[in-house]
Each structure stands twice: as C-alpha cells, then as structure tokens.
C-alpha cells in the first residue's frame, strides 16, 4: 500500500488555506497534508497551526524565508521520501487547483512515474484568465515544445509522483529554484524515459490574493530555457553528470 502525502507550498496565503483545506477534505478525509510555509508576512503559519489543532494529519515544514517555489517543492519531496512517503501529490495554495482531481490522479498513479493535470487538453481550461496570462502561458508551452520537444503541460505544479517507480533524485537534478523548476523537472523525466499520464482539467484564475508570478520570473525563465536548450544541443545528461558525483 502506498503511503501518500499532499504537498502545498504557501506564501501569503492565509485567506486561501482554510478554503483549500475544506475542499481537500471534501474529497479525501484521510490524506496527509504537508504545508511548506516560507515565513509569510501575513502570518499564514498561524492559520496552518489552527488547522493542525483539529487535524493531526496536517503537517508543516517552516522555512525562515522565501526561497522560491521550486526550492519549496524539492525540499518537501526530499522530506517526504526520507519519511517513506512513496506517493506525493503537489498543488498550489491559490485555489486554482481543484482538489476534486486528486482521487483521479491517485487512481492512475500505480501505472506511471508521474500523473499530472494538463491545461491544454480542454480549450476552456484557462478561459477565465486575463488575456496576457493566457498568451504568456501558451507561448511558453509552444517554446518548450519547439526547443526541448516537450509535448505535455510542463509548467504546472498539480502533480502526483509515484516514488515506487520514480527515482526522486531526478527531480532534485533540476537546478532552478523558481517557476522554471516545473518544466525543467519534466524535461529531465522525459530524457530519462519516465512514463507520464496527463488528465484534462479546468483551471480557474486566482480570485483571492495576488499572484507571485512577476514579469521578472518570465524573463528569467526565458533566459533559463535557452540555457537548457544549449545544454540539450551539447547532449549534457543531468543524470550522468550528477550521479557521477556519488
């Protein structure tokens, strides 16, 4: 039997966390939850602590400061694997990821290294997003497809990793600690011939709070994409390079 945990990084999400928690429990009463909290100025940690008092399946990994969304995912995944969790679901805390998809992801997980949602399988998936965000998201998808031959939705965080089949260290080989971690990790998994199952979903735009994604992240992501593209041309293998250090 798989030991499961849901990983949710948070930063200034005190209003969203209680709503998200209730939605999660609507579809899964017993799933363990790990909040990765980066010492939010709005005291999100106090909200999480309140939830913990009534639900002993809720855990928190508190970090001293904001270190990047990719860094939070890598830290939490390492934490989970060391505690023998072999099925790790990850999602955002901004209410754009609907927990109703989690049971379906878990259902498919035994057969795949990774099960994830895809925002491009349904034409209406991101219809509620501002035009500029839709354009940026689709442009990134096309660039990743053209430059790195990634045909799946590689920039989303709503995923389910099966560490009975997948070597978790492959995710840690992704060097980016910001938003590019998501597509970089998918790129690595594809290179290593991991099996990926995608499920269709509709993703609403954030309605409470403000997005952490800034234009500087997009520009850095573009620079980082071309850097990885050059490495790809030189046929540099993450796995061979990193495992040679062990």
Image (tube, rainbow, N blue to C red):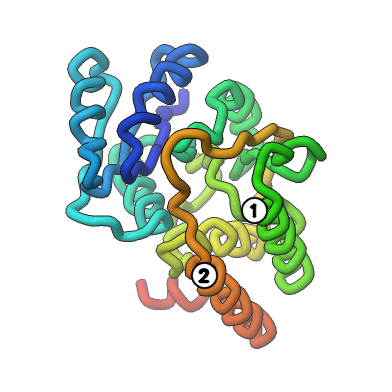
Disc 1 is placed on an element classified as helix
- Can residue 201 be seen from the camera position used here? yes
Residue under circle 1? 133
Disc 2 is placed on an element classified as helix
The x, y position of residue 82, in whole percent, is 30, 44
Residue 239 - label: 2
Residue at image location 35% in from the left, 37% down from the top: 13
Q: How many marks?
A: 2
Residue at image location 44% in from the left, 69% down from the top: 175
Q: How far apart are the two marked residues, 1 and 2, measured between alpha carbons? A: 33 Å
Q: Quadrant of the C terminus?
A: bottom left
Answer left or right for 18 relative to 60: right
**To which quarter of the image does residue 210 belong?**
top left
The x, y position of residue 36, in whole percent, is 31, 42
Looking at the image, do the residues carrying marks 1 and 2 touch, with CB atoms under 8 Å apart? no
Looking at the image, tell me whether mark 1 or mark 2 is earlier in sequence order: 1
**Closer to the camera, 195 or 50?**
50
Outermost bottom residue: 234
**Closer to the camera, 231 or 207?**
207
Position of 16 relative to 152 (above/below): above
Answer left or right for 208 relative to 84: right
Residue at image location 78% in from the left, 36% down from the top: 124
The x, y position of residue 75, in whole percent, is 32, 52
- Can residue 88 be seen from the camera position used here? no
């Amino acid at each position: 039997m798989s030991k499961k945990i849901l990983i949710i990084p948070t930063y200034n999400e005190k209003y969203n966390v209680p709503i998200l928690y209730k939605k999660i429990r609507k579809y899964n009463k017993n799933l363990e939850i790990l909040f990765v909290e980066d010492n939010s100025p709005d005291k999100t940690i106090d909200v999480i602590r309140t939830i913990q008092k009534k639900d002993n399946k809720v855990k928190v990994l508190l970090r001293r400061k904001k270190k990047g969304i990719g860094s939070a995912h890598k830290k939490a995944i390492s934490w989970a694997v060391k505690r023998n969790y072999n099925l790790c679901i990850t999602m955002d805390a901004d209410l754009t990821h609907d927990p109703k998809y989690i049971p379906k992801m878990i259902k498919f997980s035994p057969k795949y290294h990774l099960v994830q949602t895809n925002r491009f399988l349904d034409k209406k998936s991101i219809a509620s997003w501002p035009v500029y965000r839709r354009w940026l998201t689709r442009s990134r998808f096309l660039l990743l497809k053209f430059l790195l031959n990634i045909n799946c939705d590689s920039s989303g965080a709503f995923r389910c990793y099966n560490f009975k089949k997948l070597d978790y260290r492959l995710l840690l080989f992704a060097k980016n600690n910001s938003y590019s971690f998501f597509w970089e990790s998918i790129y690595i998994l594809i290179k290593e011939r991991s099996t990926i199952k995608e499920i269709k979903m509709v993703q609403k735009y954030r309605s409470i709070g403000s997005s952490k994604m800034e234009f500087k992240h997009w520009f850095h992501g573009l620079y980082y994409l071309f850097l990885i593209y050059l490495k790809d041309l030189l046929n540099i293998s993450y796995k061979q390079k990193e495992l040679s250090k062990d």
